[in-house]
Amino acid sequence: MQKPLAWLISTLRHQKSQEGYKQIGGGSPLRRITEEQAKALQSILHSRGVDAKIYIGMRYWHPFTEEAIAQIKRDGIQKLVILPLYPQFSISTSGSSFRLLERIQADDPAFKAIDYTVIPSWYERPGYLKAMAGLIATELDRLPNPDQAHVFFSAHGVPVSYVEEAGDPYQREIEDCVAKIMQTLGRPNAHSLAYQSRVGPIDWLQPYTQDAIHDLAQRGVQDLVVVPISFVSEHIETLEEIDMEYREVAEEAGIHGFHRVPALNTDATFIEDLANMVTESIDGPRISLEEVFHPPERTKLYPQEKWEWGLTTAAEVWNGRLAMVGFFALLIEMISGRGLLHSLGVM
C-alpha cells in the first residue's frame, strides 16, 4: 500500500506545493546549494592535502542516499565520514538518514566493510556558532537602531511525542544552540525561539512561529530579525514559509520591520568548519551508526518511514481522512436522497 498511498498524498498536496514553488521561482534551490556546499568543502580539503571526494545523499529526492552509496562502492572508497547537514540531531532528520544507512549496511557486505565514522550533531562547534553570529550581526547592523531589534529564531518543529516519549534530544539541542549563538553574538538584543512547519493532527513543539509573532507584536516589537536556526540552505521553508507567509503574519500583526537572516549556504566560515570536522573525524575515534541515538521501537514516526499495520501515525492520519470522506458522503446522501444507503433501504 505504501506506493499507492504516497501517490495519493502527493496528488492531494500537489496544488498547494506547486503554488509554493511558483512563489519562489518555480523550484527549490536546495539541491543546487547543497552541490555548491559539497564543491566548496572538497576544494578546502584538497587545499589541505586531503584527497577526499564529497558524495551527496538525500533522503527523499535525487541523488538518493542509495545512489550515493552505490557510487561510493564503485569508486572503491575505503574510509568514509558521514556528515549530516543538520546542526542539531533529531530522530526525524539525521536519525532517519542514519537508520536508512543501517538498513543498507545490514544487507550490503561491501558497504559494511568500509571504515566509517558518523558525526551525529555539530551545533556546538565554534566555527558554526561564529558563522551564525556573523550573519545575524550583519543583518542587525543594517538597522537604524540595531540594539532594539528582537532576534527571533524559527526552528523546524517536531512532534512533542518525539521529545517526551521517545527521548529525542532535538529540543534540548535547539535551545542550547540558540543560547550559544546569542553568547557568541555578544549583543544586548532580546531574543526568542519558536517552531515552524507543523503538519498533521498531532501536537508539535511550541510556541508555534505564527503565534509567537503575534505575541511579539502585542508586546510592541517593531523590528524582527528572523533566524532560520535549523536550516543551512535556502529552500521552500525559508524562501516561502518564512519570507512570505510569516512576513505577512508579522505585517498584519503590526510588525513592519521584518528582516530575515540568510541561511549559511556557502558562508566561508561555515564551510571552513565543515572541513575541520571532516579532518578531525578522519583520524579521530570512530562513532558507529549503532552508537547514535535510536528511538524506541514503538515510537510513532511522522511522517511514517514505512507502512506498518496497527495503531501507527500513518494509520491515525488515514483513519481520520477516511472518516471525513465517509462523513461527507453520508451528508451528501442525506441531502440528495441518493447513494448506497438509500439503495440498500437503510435510509
Image (cartoon, rainbow, N blue to C red):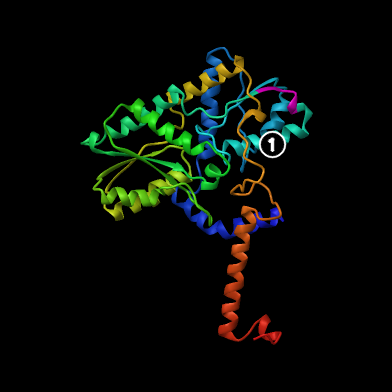
Rendered image quadrant of residue 103: top right
Q: Residue at x 51, y 27 (%)?
A: 122
Q: Is residue 112 magenta?
A: yes
Q: Is residue 8 above or below residue 192?
A: below
Q: Position of residue 109 (x, y in %)?
A: 78, 28
Q: Nearer the viewer, residue 306 or 55?
A: 306
Residue 232 shows in the view: no
Q: Position of residue 181 (x, y in %)?
A: 38, 29
Q: Position of residue 161 (x, y in %)?
A: 54, 47
Q: Is residue 286 above or below residue 303?
A: above
Please state the total of marks drawn on the protein image: 1
Query: In the rendered image, which residue does mark 1 sit on?
Result: 66
Q: Residue at x 53, y 21 (%)?
A: 277
Q: Is residue 267 above or below residue 99?
A: above
Q: Which quadrant would the C terminus be assigned to in this image?
A: bottom right
Q: Nearer the viewer, residue 51 or 107?
A: 107
Q: Residue furthest top?
A: 49
Q: Is residue 8 left or right of residue 38?
A: right
Q: Residue at x 41, y 49 (%)?
A: 208
Residue type pointed to by label 1:
Glu
